[in-house]
Amino acid sequence: MVSETERDGETWYECDACGLMFDDQGDANAHEANCDAEDPSYIQ
């Protein structure tokens, strides 16, 4: 599931499984569909 969060006056979309944040809801939904719920292997 993707949560909408406001930070620094902008809306961000956070993957509830791993916590990765996106500035585009479409990107967040695409990520969530493929998320394995592990910590990302790259720096956020």
Image: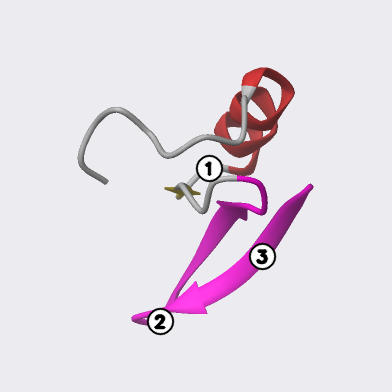
Q: Mark 1: which secondary structure?
A: loop
Q: Quadrant of residue 29?
A: top right
Q: Which mark is residue 4?
A: 3
Q: How many marks?
A: 3
Residue 18 vertical placement versus 4 (above, below): above
Question: Label 1: how many residues lie within 10 Å, few (<14), some (14-19) or many (20+)?
Answer: few
Marks 2 and 1, how far apart at CA: 15 Å
Residue 24 shown left or right of residue 43 in the figure: right
| Residue most extreme to the top | 34
Q: Which mark is residue 24?
A: 1
Residue positioned 54% across, 46% down in the render: 18
Q: Earlier in the sequence, mark 3 or mark 2?
A: 3
The magenta span reads 1-17
Q: Earlier in the sequence, mark 3 or mark 1?
A: 3
The amino acid beneath tag 2 is Gly
| Residue most extreme to the right | 1
Is 13 in the magenta?
Answer: yes
Q: Which residue is mark 2?
A: 9
The amino acid beneath tag 1 is Asp
Is 26 in the magenta?
Answer: no
Principal SS element in the magenta part?
A: strand
Residue 24 shown left or right of residue 44 in the figure: right
Q: Quadrant of residue 42?
A: top left
Question: Label 2: how many residues lie within 10 Å, few (<14), some (14-19) or many (20+)?
Answer: few
Residue 23 shown left or right of residue 26 in the figure: left
